Image: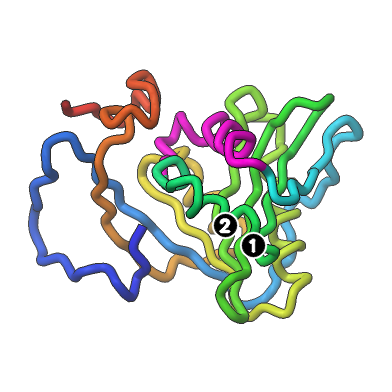
């Protein structure tokens, strides 16, 4: 996704999306001070948040796909091995897996590479973990970990391909919308990055 400073300004009206591409409305949200955490609950006794220190690319991509395939997460999958390795090896990037009995249930990624800033780069659960209240506990953990550092801003983005409740979830968590962009990209289901069966809520126009 382009940053809100680099994205071109679109003219009012409709714009055609090239064949084989997808288009999403991306909303960025931010908080500039720690909020009061909502419905703060610990993770269940059998569930832990485990930090992955310099995970190998395949392990990371497997977790990323398990969490994000249904929502057309593709940005990390299109990176080459070296570019991904640079992120995974950077000590300013925290990658955590939510686990139960050794099985991965979720992904949390915090990016502190920009001064005074943390990006909540990725947060999500595998399909079987949805609806158990784990998302609220996971976002609370993300906010606490981010603000334990000397930052001035925590931000996140979500888009119209994500879970329909994602935008409201982030707003209830203390984030305020600050920018809106349109992202156009090759459909990852047509390039072979993701199976064609992923994200049936997003029309596939070959």
**Residue 129's spot in the image, x, y percent?**
67, 28
Residue at mark 1: 90
Quarter of the image where one finds residue 143: bottom right
Vertical order, 51 against 149 (above or below): above
Is residue 68 a member of the stretch shown in magenta? yes
Q: Residues within 10 Å of mark 1 (few under 14, many from 20)?
A: some
Quadrant for the N terminus in the image: bottom left
Q: Residue at x 71, y 47 (%)?
A: 96
Residue 39 lies left or right of residue 46; in this view the side is: left
Tell me whether circle 2 and circle 1 mark residues in contact (CB < 8 Å).
yes
Residue named by callout 2: 87
**Is the stretch drawn in magenta largely helix, strand or loop?**
helix
SS for dot 2:
helix
Q: Spot the residue most to the right.
A: 45
**Left or right: where 191 falls relative to 65:** left
Quarter containing the C terminus = top left
Residue under the point 76% across and 62% down: 144
| Residue displayed at 27% across by 68% down | 7
Rounded to the nearest angstrom, the CA distance separating label 2 from label 1 is 5 Å
x, y (%) of residue 127?
58, 26
State the image quarter where residue 72 is shown: top left
Relative to 204, residue 176 above or below? below
Q: Residue at x 33, y 21 (%)?
A: 196
What range of the chain is rendered magenta? 56-74
Residue 183 lies, in percent from the top left, at: 28, 53
Q: In the figure, 88 relative to 203: above or below?
A: below
């Amino acid at each position: 996704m382009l940053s809100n400073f680099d994205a071109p300004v679109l003219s009012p009206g409709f714009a055609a999306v090239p064949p084989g591409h997808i288009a999403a409305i991306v909303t960025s949200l931010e908080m500039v001070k720690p909020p009061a955490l909502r419905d703060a609950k610990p993770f269940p006794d059998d569930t832990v948040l485990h930090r992955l220190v310099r995970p190998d690319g395949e392990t990371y991509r497997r977790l990323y796909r398990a969490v994000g395939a249904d929502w057309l997460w593709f940005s990390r999958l299109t990176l080459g091995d070296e570019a991904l390795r640079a992120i995974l090896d950077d000590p300013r990037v925290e990658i955590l897996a939510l686990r139960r009995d050794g099985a991965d249930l979720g992904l949390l990624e915090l990016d502190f590479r920009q001064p005074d800033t943390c990006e909540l780069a990725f947060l999500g659960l595998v399909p079987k973990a949805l609806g158990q209240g784990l998302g609220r506990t996971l976002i609370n953990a993300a906010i606490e970990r981010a603000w334990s550092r000397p930052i001035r801003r925590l931000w996140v983005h979500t888009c119209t391909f994500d879970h329909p409740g994602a935008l409201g979830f982030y707003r209830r968590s203390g984030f305020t919308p600050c920018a809106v962009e349109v992202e156009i990209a090759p459909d990852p289901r047509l390039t072979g990055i993701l199976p064609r069966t992923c994200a049936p809520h997003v029309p596939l126009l070959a």
